[in-house]
Amino acid sequence: MDQILSIDKGAEEGLVQLLKFLLENDKVSGVFTLRKTTGKGFFDYALITEPGLLEDAIPLHPFMNVNGGKIISSLPPMKKPVAAVIRPCELRSFVELVKRSQGSIDDFLLISYTCGGSFPFDKTLKDNGQKLLPGYWKAVEKGVDSENIRQSCASCEHFVPQNADITVSLLGEKDLRSKCLMYLHSERSMAMTEEFDAEISDGQLEIKRFEALLEKRSEQKKKDFKEINIEDSGLDGMIDLFGRCIGCHGCMRVCPICQCVLCDFESCGYDPDTSVIANELPVRGGVRVPTDTVLFHIGRLSHMSFSCVGCGQCTEVCPADIPVSTLFRKTGEQVAGIFDYIPGRDVDEEIPVTIFKEDELSELGND
Amino acid sequence: MSKEFKPKIISFLCKWCTYSGADLAGTNRMKYPASILPVRVMCSSRVNPVFMVKSFLHGADGVFVGGCHPGDCHYQSGNYFTRRRFAILTRIFDTLGMESERLKLSWISAAEGVKFVRVTTEFTEEIKSMGENPAKKKVFL
Ligand code: SF4
Ligand code: SF4
Ligand code: SF4
């Protein structure tokens, strides 16, 4: 049975109060959270060790500028765990990175929340999303989708965190401005909050209330997957889709899964080779330069799609407006399905390319 | 068609098994199709799926990976990983609507020269019936 902490304060305020408590009482070595960077309202993720700096923390701000799972995997080791407030998809990313030896679960007290989604970049960069916030929080209180969230959020089925130590309950909570409910799932989160001033009760986050939202998002996902309609158009479809790709590799750089120390596509082996172009010309009659754009995308799919958590960062940063995340998630689900794998589900579940079973896939290779 | 279509099949062959199988076919004066363009690799698991995709997009009509039978890998378990990667890549091709039939994986041991000839001949015939890889003539690759 989980424990519920209840505070008579707004959800964000209550959470900040807990973060302060943890830091001031030396339960954690630091706090990782979104925080206002300047008075102008810009915000960023920050690792904070001075409790006073938490005054400006906005841990629940619905904007993911970078994938927090990717960022915490690069934090320095500290004496005690760092309390990190990240979204469910960021948490799933982190779990995938831990499987790749790029982080350790024990280094963090993982705090997440039932997530109403993030705003797209273009909607937030103008005024930091200030105008959209009231409507957003109203929707979250009702447990429905705000119309302003990212496409990838509106079709995200994993909005209830898995593997979190603490879940702040947001979706469907009627009084987010006056009530903060936090579910403690792990022993260490209970131990750390023992002396924290809050009402404590036993209980479990009931999943039933999310059924309608889950159904809606699954429908949306089906629609998005259908719209991208790649399986009917084949290579021509890929060329259509990526014909406008400028090869900036931005989608890869922001991807929380693509964290290879030396990426294939950044290595000299994949540098454009003029002799290849010269050899191709007589056959093709013309070659689009730079070459190998489709190769980059299919190659990346083959390396990591089974771990795609659908965070949508790749689509957000694409300057050519290519729905990268829809394609990666759709393909990823197909690939992961072979191995009954769900990215971010369980830190002990190894990624499909590092393990095998002797008695599987026996239809392959036998002639 | 004015000229008979002679497919090109880029073939990644494991040094310990399939490549030696091809050698055996040669020393026994058996003939395997000239469509097979062998690339010797130390293990079939050395084949990054990107190699296969690159071969395909640069116009190979077929891509063949040959390794030791499961359980017989010189490095104990390389070919099990190969098998998973191959499953992943073909599933990606299928999801993208690309012709996964142009990709082939086969276990052929160093003693199976005859099998090497049979499998490569059959695969060549299959590719012939599919025709040229449409990727070959695309300006966009
Ligand atoms: S491929 Fe895109 S959606 Fe998937 S994990 Fe990477 S950045 Fe997120
Ligand atoms: S594209 Fe492949 S090699 Fe490059 S970072 Fe991603 S997974 Fe690693
Ligand atoms: S971000 Fe967009 S333009 Fe840049 S490499 Fe990725 S798909 Fe291409």
Image: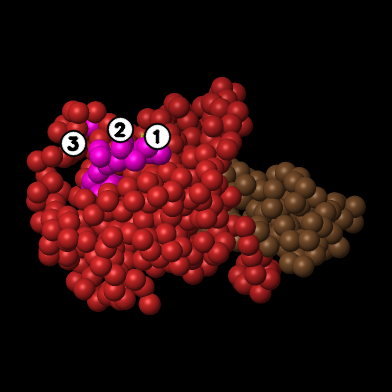
Marked residue chain, label 2: A
Region rendered in magenta: A42-64
State the residue position of label 1.
Answer: A250
Where residue B56 appears, as percent x and y from the top left, is 55, 45
> What kind of residue is marked 1?
Gly
Observer-nearest of B58 and A130: A130
Q: Residue furthest right?
A: B27
Chain B palette colour: brown
**Which one is closest to the eye, mark 2 or mark 3?**
3
Chain in red?
Answer: A
- Residue type at mark 3: give it: Asn
Q: Where is residue A141 drawn, in percent x and y?
A: 14, 61
Q: Residue at x 13, y 46 (%)?
A: A133
Q: Position of residue B135 (x, y in %)?
A: 48, 43
2 or 3: tag closer to the N-terminus: 3
Element type at mark 3: loop
Say which element carries label 2: loop
Label 2 CB less than 8 angstroms from ligand 3: yes
Asked whether residue A112 is drawn in magenta, I would say no
Residues under numbered marks 1 and 2 in contact, where contact means CB atoms less than 8 Å apart: yes
**Which of the two discs, 1 and 3, labels the residue nearer the N terminus?**
3
Q: Is residue B44 above or below residue A3?
A: above
Q: Residue at x 58, y 36 (%)?
A: A262
Mark 1 secondary-structure assignment? helix
For badge 2, the amino acid type reads Pro
Lower position in the chain sequence, tag 1 or tag 2: 1
Q: Tell me, yes or no, whether the highlighted magenta stretch contains residue A43.
A: yes
The image shows residue A44 at horizontal and vertical percentages of 31, 36
Q: Residues within 10 Å of mark 2 (few under 14, many from 20)?
A: some
Q: What distance separates the C-alpha of mark 1 from that of mark 2? A: 8 Å
